[in-house]
Amino acid sequence: MTAKVEMADYEARAEAAYAAMYDAAPHNVKDHYEDACLNLSHAIESAAGLGLQQEVVRLKKRSEEIDAVYNHQFRYVGR
């Protein structure tokens, strides 16, 4: 698998985990959130390794968006 394909795969996994947050039972939301964060982190590392600075910026912004959604909508659900 090429590094660019690997980056796209990590991003797709992150987006799938993010989408799963909305359908998950309250006690499982954090697991999906952490999967999304981990996969985006790997995607960012891949983009940085390829020298794709615009992709790094875009992926970091997406990570911040997912953090904000989790903190606003899900952090205290099920407690």
Image (spheres, rainbow, N blue to C red):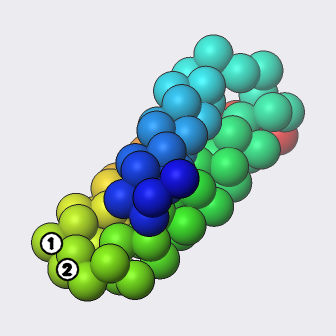
Q: Which residue is mark 1?
A: 54
Q: Nearer the viewer, residue 39 or 62?
A: 39
Picture quadrant of residue 27: top right
Where residue 35 sits: x, y (%)?
68, 49
Q: Is residue 61 left or right of residue 35?
A: left
Q: Amino acid at mark 2?
A: Gln
Q: Are marks 1 and 2 in contact (CB under 8 Å)?
A: yes
> What residue lies at 23% left-to-right and 66% top-to-bottom?
55
> What residue lies at 44% left-to-right and 71% top-to-bottom?
46
Q: Secondary structure at mark 1?
A: helix
Q: Is residue 30 above or below residue 6?
A: above
Q: Is residue 70 left or right of residue 53?
A: right
Q: Nearer the viewer, residue 71 or 40?
A: 40
Q: Amino acid at mark 1?
A: Gln
> What residue lies at 47% left-to-right and 77% top-to-bottom?
45
Which mark is on residue 46? none
Q: Is residue 6 left or right of residue 53?
A: right
Q: Is residue 23 above or below residue 77?
A: above
Q: Is residue 32 left or right of residue 65?
A: right
Q: Which residue is mark 2?
A: 53
